[in-house]
Each structure stands twice: as structure tokens, then as C-alpha cells.
Image (tube, rainbow, N blue to C red):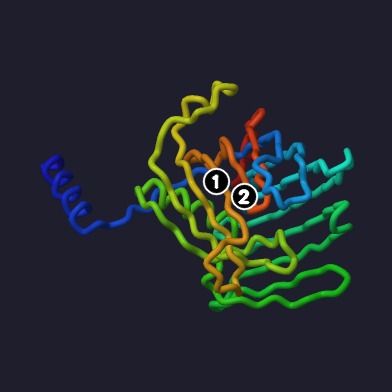
Amino acid sequence: MFFKNYILISLVLIVSNIKISYSVQLLSHTANYVLSVQKINKNSSLEGGEGRTIFEIKKVCNGWDVSENYILVYQLPNEKNAKSFSSYKTFENNDGTLHSFQLNEKSDFNGENNYEGYVEKSNNKVTGSLINKNNKDLSFNNEVLFPIDHLKKLINKAKNNENYFNSKVFFGSEETELIKIVSAFIGKERKSKLKNNEYLSQKMIWPMKLAFYDNESKQSKPDYEITLEMDETGVVHFYEINYGDFIIKADLQKIKLINNPYCK
């Protein structure tokens, strides 16, 4: 009887095209990537560049701590170079209703930039504060997602064999454009191409392309695009960022797993 009922339920799901909500289990880890500047537009002043970034996502009892630290050295004409450093930290609670962020960066191009803040969902609104030299009140409508919540929903779409996901996401990593419209195009699942890591080399990944647009802009061309390969635990096996004039390619060098805490 159970087997017959199972077949009937399966048929109903197929016919009605119901999207199943999978439980996404993100992996706490630290990932080290080697960066290289490639495919430079002939009109660009850049001649190349290289660097490293360390990305960490860590489960804590009430949510997720995320950090990314990178250094990138751009090669300029006449054997000159320009350095860029960045440290970005965030916290997001378990139900995706609270997000705090802190950015510290220094660049030979744009100087220093430091700020922090928080946003919270309540009563169909997203409100918060941006703190730099002055405090600035923030207010948005409730359709905005926070990064971890967006990541989980993106993986869920991939598990449901959906190939497109469009949403507004509060990243907080750009002071003048705190929110981005993200259009995600999801490819068919396949085995990872990584060869230098035994743990990840047998994993199944989804190739994705994410296009990022200014929330206030109506232009059809994105500000930038990220092509990546990600598995069901949120580990990015490879990515590259296309800024139009140049591309930054990131190759995963090593990954370290982090044990989740014991929480009552």
C-alpha cells in the first residue's frame, strides 16, 4: 500500500510541478584562492595583476559569520603597480532577518574606505544604520534578501532543476550601492573539474553565471558578472569576475573544514 501511495504522490508532484524545498546544509570552511587579472580590454590601463583571497564561512549558534580578506597587485604601464587590500566581515542570523557588516579597504586607486552597519527585517520593512564618519539611517522594502538566505535559496533552485533565479540582495560591500539586483543563470549539474583536492574532486557542482545590477538602474547591461562553480554545501570550486575592461580569475588553492559548535 505504501509503495502505491508513494507512486501516486510522485505523480502528483510531477504533474502539478510543485517545487520541493530542500534542507540546505552549508559547510563551515576556509577557502584560499589565487587571483589573476586576465583578458584585459585594449582600452584598459591595466597590463595584468595577481593576488590572493581568503574566504571563510563559519556556523555559530545563532547564525553565520562570514569574512573575506584579499590583496591584489595590479600591473600598470612602465613597470609600475597599484595595490588593493580589503577586509570584509558579516554576520547573519539563522532565519535571515538580521545582517551586520564591516568593511575596511585601502587602494592605491581610491584611497581608504571604512564603514560598518546593520540591517534588520521587521514589519514588512528592512531598516538599519550605516556608520562611517556620520550615521545614516537605512530603509528598504521587505523583498530584499540577505546574502546567506540568498545563497540557500539559490542552492534550492539548483536542486529543483530550475535554471533562473532573480532577486534583490543586500550585500553591504559597496557603500553607494548596498543592494544589488542579482540574476542567476544555473547550468546542469556535473562533476567538479578540480584535481588538486581529493575531498572536492568527486563533488557534483552547478555551473552558474550571476549578473549584478544597480538596484536603481534600468540598464540592460550588468555592472559586472561572476561565473562560478558551486556544490550543494555552498563551496565555490572556481570563480571569475568580469568587470568588462578586465577579468579576475580565482582558482581554489586549498580548503580547510571548520567544525560546527555544539549548541543547545
The answer to which quarter of the image holds residue 177 is: bottom right
Residue wearing tag 2? 242
Give the percent coordinates (x, y) of residue 152.
50, 51
Residue wearing tag 1? 227
Give the percent coordinates (x, y) of residue 88.
75, 52
Query: SS of the residue at dot 1?
Result: strand
Q: Residue at x 59, y 73 (%)?
A: 217
The vertical placement of 144 against 253, above or below, is: below
Q: Calculate the distance from the C-alpha at mark 1 to the C-alpha at mark 2.
A: 8 Å
Crowding at label 2, few (<14), some or many (≥20) Cα neighbours within 10 Å? Answer: some
Q: Earlier in the sequence, mark 1 or mark 2?
A: 1
Q: Nearer the viewer, residue 169 or 43?
A: 43
Residue 97 visible in this rendered orientation of the protein = no
Residue 138 visible in this rendered orientation of the protein = yes
The vertical placement of 68 against 253, above or below, is: below
Identify the amino acid type marked 2.
Asn
The vertical placement of 24 against 211, above or below, is: above
Left or right of 99 on screen, residue 193: left
The quarter of the picture where the N terminus appears is top left
- Residue 188's label in the rendered image is none
Q: Nearer the viewer, residue 249 or 180?
A: 249
Give the percent coordinates (x, y) of residue 224.
61, 56
Q: Residue at x 64, y 57 (%)?
A: 92
The answer to which quarter of the image holds residue 28 is: top right
Between marks 1 and 2 in the image, the one whose residue lies nearer the viewer: 2
Identify the amino acid type marked 1.
Thr
